[in-house]
Amino acid sequence: MADFECEKCKKIIDLDIFLKNFKVCPNCNYHYSLNSEERIKLIADEGSFNEIAANIKSIDFLNFTDSKPYKERIIESQKKSGISEAIITGYAKTGGFNIALGVMDFNFMGGSMGSVVGERIKLLADLSIEKKVPLILICSSGGARMQEGIVSLMQMAKTVSAINKVKENKILYISVITNPTTGGVSASFATIADIIIAEPQALFCFAGPRVVKQTIKKELPSDFGLSERNLRNGQIDLIVNRKDLKEKIINILKLFLN
Amino acid sequence: MNDELRNENESMQGLYDNLSKISLFKKIKFLSKLNFAKAKANIIFKIKNLKKDTRIAERAWRIVELSRNEKRPKTTDYIKNIFDDFIELSGDRLSSDDKAITTGLGKINGRTVAIIGHNKGKDIKERIEYNFGMPNPSGYRKSQRIMELADKFNFPVITFIDTPGANPAIEAEDSGQASAIAKSIELMFKLKVPTIVVLIGEGGSGGALALAIGNYIMMLENSTYSVISPEGCAAILWKDQSATKQAAAMLKLTAKDMLNLNVIDKIIHEPKGGAQNDPERMIKILKDNLIIVLSKFDGLNGEDLKIQRSNKFESLGFFEK
């Protein structure tokens, strides 16, 4: 069918094969980003996902206007991404196991974390405790949502507090790092997981490459912040190819839940 | 394109130009019958608003500058002059000792407390030694060690926040900056002792928050707390460094803003013109406040302290339901 050039390896790729391969380049294994709907399809058993907290929506409580009012950005993002916010949360099954699943979506304002992302994660963590089911968060975010000022920073604390309770209740928490996961999300709920899985070549760092490069005024190593380097440096547990992700999660759940 | 037009037309110069165009039009005979009053009033209204915005931006920026003032009392000044029998404790017990954060134990009003604070340094030599108050993961891990020690012996934890942010460097990333910050936040939610946070200067992003999970959070009048520096915000959102002051105003980073947003519990007033004008008095004011706040938490049990802390942070956020 239609062909396109892989932006990473520049090889011409057959679109059909690419899509069947979960949007992974069959030549160089570069993992293109998935939206939340595709992600849910990948992880959750068919038809098992029941969204919660969909009614919680962003408001522009600071009257924040940069080159565009925040109000407009929210509406535009909702139109562009077709979803209500940068994370979709719900109750689901994977391999028959009940789970509390949250999936971030980079298409919604770069997956940035504001009040809604914080509140939805908190409610999901509460659900995981109430139902005694493992919590799984698929991360993808540029960091905190600046348009919510300090309140976006506070969502780091809010999510960590809520998830800390999941952990204190001895309920398993798995985070999956997808490209990119940086800033406030990386330095909060993404890294306090019992098990951290990353997709290959996913950028996962606190300070992004641009900031670090500007600060140290030197070229960065080509694998700066990437999964393979993070694995070497002891920052993540394992790297899993997208096509094996569901199976690997089920494998882990079996170990914890018998 | 629309944005550009709007910005261009609504700059101060643009508005004044429009105003003078109107007076020109009035002089043209065949236009003189048209009523320009409404258009004129509209422009004057916009000029007033813009002047107000500029004033607000200047005010926010003045506080940003004050919060970074080199002469302001630093963590080390507060430690030296508030606590008796202070002893500095060093090292993360893994690989190094990060000078960007000072930790130790001391007494205040006869009671032993753990003290953790960012160090910015007073002169260029100190600033380099302390890495301008930008901690590496090791600094947060040292802090965690001290918090655990405090928890074990039932010492309240007092933190002083003064950092532009965590160190953005390759080695910092390689040794887990993100997880060190996250772990600090998590640990602070577990502590069964009171945690008292004081923002004394610059509260820069995650690097500040890592030490700022308080049962009680105080902020000096001219300190700031922000998700990103105004410079960084202007560069990312406006793509224009000249929008820095505007960004400072938009971010709502002053102590007053924090109180309005329920992020802090109290503003501590500074000597006239700022803490740098009378450091001695500033230290005295803070000491008095710390003694009062510590006594508030007397008799509360560890579980209640934990619940108070998590309720406080989990209630932060504004959204539509």
Image (cartoon, rainbow, N blue to C red):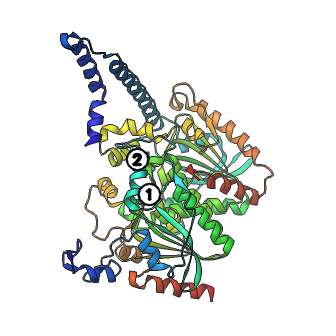
Report the label total: 2
The residue lying toward the viewer, choosing from B41 and B81, is B41
The chain holding disc 1 is A
Q: Is residue A110 visible?
A: yes
Question: Which residue position holds label 2?
Answer: A72
The circle on residue B197 is none
Residue B126 appears anywhere in the view: no
Q: For the view shown, which residue lies furthest in the right direction?
A: B299
Three-letter amino acid code at the position of disc 2: Glu
Going by the numbered disc 1, the residue's amino acid type is Ser
- Tell me: residue B266, above or below residue B111: above
Which residue is the site of mark 1? Answer: A112
Earlier sequence position, callout 2 versus callout 1: 2
User: Mark 1 Cα within 10 Å, few/some/many (few <14, many 20+)?
Assistant: many
Q: Nearer the viewer, residue B174 or A108?
A: A108
Spot occupied by residue B185 in the image (x, y as percentages of width and height): 57, 59
Residue drawn at the location 59% of the way across and 33% of the way down: B282
Residue positioned 27% across, 25% down in the render: B13
Residue B64, position as x, y percentages in the image: 45, 36
Q: Position of residue B27 (x, y in %)?
A: 21, 10
Q: Give the quarter of the figure containing the N terminus of chain B.
A: top left
Q: Nearer the viewer, residue B114 or A209?
A: A209
Per the model, the C-alpha gap separating discs 2 and 1 is: 16 Å
Q: Chain of mark 2?
A: A
Which of the two marks, 2 or 1, is nearer to us in this view?
2
- Residue B90 percent across, percent down from the top left: 55, 59
